[in-house]
Image (spheres, grey):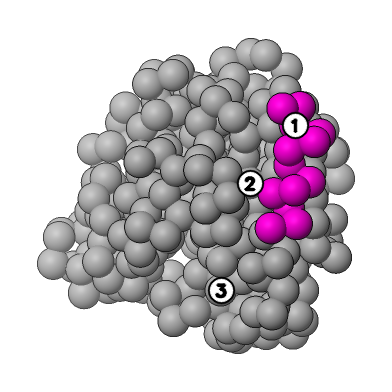
Amino acid sequence: MDDSDYYPGVLDAVMEQVRSHIGEGRVADYIPELADVDPDEFGFSIATVDGGMYSTGDQARTRFSMQSITKVFTLALVMRGHAGSDVWKRVHREPSGNAFNSLHQLEFENGVPRNPMINPGALIVTDQLLSDTGDAVGELRKLLCEETGDPDLHTDNLVAESESRSGDRNRALAYLMASFGNIRNPVPEVLDHYFRQCSITVSCEELARAGLFLARRGRRADGSELLSVSDTRRILAVMLTCGTYDAAGEFAYRVGIPCKSGVGGGILAVVPGQCTVAAWGPGLDAKGNSVTAALALEAFTDVTGCSVF
């Protein structure tokens, strides 16, 4: 069946499952600028490896804060070529089982984060990218603009400033790792790049396009290689096991494809070789994952049978 006949039916099924739940959950009010986002918004987009785009929800083209979803892209940037081998000496690849900003676990494990999908691990990756390029947030924005084809993707400075004002836990994580010798650049500089990269805004359609290199096994929109096939597989494995904070097991059970969520309410999911899916609903559950985006992805895999299991 042609995609143009198939995916509209999938979108109808997704909306049927999600419609009555739109608005559920609680926005990330501990970041003041995100506290004002309307919880009743919802968007859902599917980008296929052959260039198709299929969307539903009134806000599929509304931009939202990427937050932790950026961790996938910064990890890809440090892993490109052979440059990424060093980062795995500084961060592990195991699920955390604790909150994404846990200090206790980090101190117990001598300043080495459990994985790159939680805040301390992402700070290590940002630190590495800053050492590699001199401009971590600039490299991330460049990648996103090139993969989406939109040169107008930017950091929302109000969100970045809000994150900085309320970012004492991230400061504590960074300084704790620095005390173990696991931060190489000045901590304030690393935090500035981290806050600004998390505050880049995208729509569901843009996010789905940006992530397609993962579905294409490392190939970028222009056909060049960003990652090897094996490194792409490894990033997808980390997304599956660690990408939804300490709810990764629940997501593997309910959704069954690699996902990365962010407290801005977005989730990026990948069906290797076929498509990427981006869902957005600002209301979060107790683990920090979007309620409606998770429901939408569960409906998507139920309807399509796209689970990797």
Magenta residues, start to end: 1-13
Q: Look at the numbered disc 1 and give the secondary structure of its residue.
A: helix
In which quadrant will I find the N terminus? top right
In which quadrant will I find the C terminus? top left
| Residue 174: percent from left, percent from top | 37, 63
Above or below for 88 versus 41: above
Is 222 placed left or right of 150 in the picture?
Answer: left
Q: Nearer the viewer, residue 18 or 28?
A: 18
Three-letter amino acid code at disc 2? Answer: Val
Q: CA distance from mark 1 to mark 3?
A: 27 Å
Q: CA distance from mark 2 to mark 3?
A: 16 Å
| Residue 46: percent from left, percent from top | 70, 44
Three-letter amino acid code at disc 3? Answer: Val
Q: Earlier in the sequence, mark 1 or mark 3?
A: 1
Q: Which residue is mark 1?
A: 3
Is 284 placed left or right of 153 in the picture?
Answer: left
Q: Look at the numbered disc 2 and give the secondary structure of its residue.
A: strand
CB atoms of marks 2 and 1 within 8 Å: no
**Could one spot residue 303 in this view of the protein?**
yes
- From the image, give the main secondary structure of the stretch colored magenta: helix
Above or below for 239 versus 100: above
Q: Which residue is mark 3?
A: 291
Q: Which residue is mark 2?
A: 277
Q: Nearer the viewer, residue 144 or 9?
A: 9
